[in-house]
Amino acid sequence: NAGVTQTPKFRVLKTGQSMTLLCAQDMNHEYMYWYRQDPGMGLRLIHYSVGEGTTAKGEVPDGYNVSRLKKQNFLLGLESAAPSQTSVYFCASSTRTSGEGADTQYFGPGTRLTVL
Amino acid sequence: ILNVEQSPQSLHVQEGDSTNFTCSFPSSNFYALHWYRWETAKSPEALFVMTLNGDEKKKGRISATLNTKEGYSYLYIKGSQPEDSATYLCASQVGSSNTGKLIFGQGTTLQVKP
């Protein structure tokens, strides 16, 4: 059981280049999230999805787009990379639980992106 | 945007010391409070999820309490060990939460010296 996987693990881009980060989960989770982690800033939500075919903006969505064409995959795109997007990107997934109904998120290993 | 604040930002203790840190969150529209443990070069892993005022959860030497009325949670580590060194994140889940969204604090980084 792989859990949440992310590809690639590392990437270096030049300003203006585009790329797509792939997140995949094999837990049949409904919800998926993309975060960025910067020093002193904690985890900040970029975009999220509550189901296949649906996406929504998080706290810091500008400069990013996402797609959830399949339930198990959540793609994060950078159309024109900027140095301010240098960060570590984490994907997470969760499912609605019965009982307390609080949703533990399961995180991928992260993608370290540098934009020169 | 809700503010989730954690203190202290970092902490250095000796092996065997007990320690605690604080997470404060807006008490209005509260749904759940999560604690995660984040080791260097790894991804965050869930420790606890708490929903009820007065909740107390325990896992080995680590425990957490929750006060939803005043908007704070404490994480305690009894007899710290070097393997406890990590960043501890708390996150607030708000509203009816049919999205599962979490608002994370900045974390408390714990370093336990042998």
Image (cartoon, coloured by chain):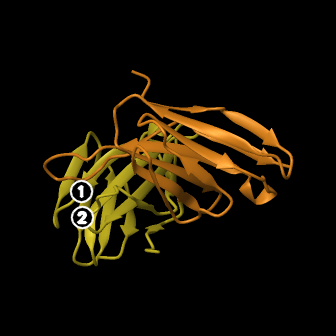
Q: Residue at x 47, y 49 (%)?
A: A33
Q: Earlier in the sequence, mark 1 or mark 2?
A: 1
Q: Quadrant of residue A110?
A: top right
Could you say which is closer to the camera, residue A115 or residue A21? Answer: A21
The type of residue carrying mark 2 is Leu
Measured from the top left, where is residue B108 in percent x and y? 49, 58
The hue of chain A in the figure is orange
Could you say which is closer to the camera, residue A75 or residue B103? Answer: A75
The mark total stands at 2
Label 2 element class = strand
In the figure, A95 relative to A37: above or below?
Answer: above
- Asked whether the viewer can see residue B106, the reply is yes
Circle 1 residues within 10 Å: few <14, some 14–19, many ≥20: many
Task: Return the chain for callout 1.
Answer: B
Say whether marks 1 and 2 touch (CB < 8 Å): yes
In the figure, A106 relative to B92: above or below?
Answer: above
* Front of the two marks 1 and 2: 1
Q: Residue at x 50, y 37 (%)?
A: A108
Measured from the top left, where is residue B9 in percent x and y? 53, 63
Give left or right: position of B2 versus B109.
left
The yellow-tinted chain is: B
- Disc 2 target residue: B66
Label 1 element class = strand
- Disc 1 target residue: B50
- Asked whether the viewer can see residue B85, the reply is no
Could you say which is closer to the camera, residue A17 or residue A4? Answer: A17
Furthest toward the top, the residue is A1
Measured from the top left, where is residue A69 in percent x and y? 49, 39
Task: Return the chain for callout 2.
Answer: B
- State the CA–CA distance, disc 1 to disc 2: 7 Å
Furthest toward the left, the residue is A99
Give left or right: position of B18 versus A67.
left
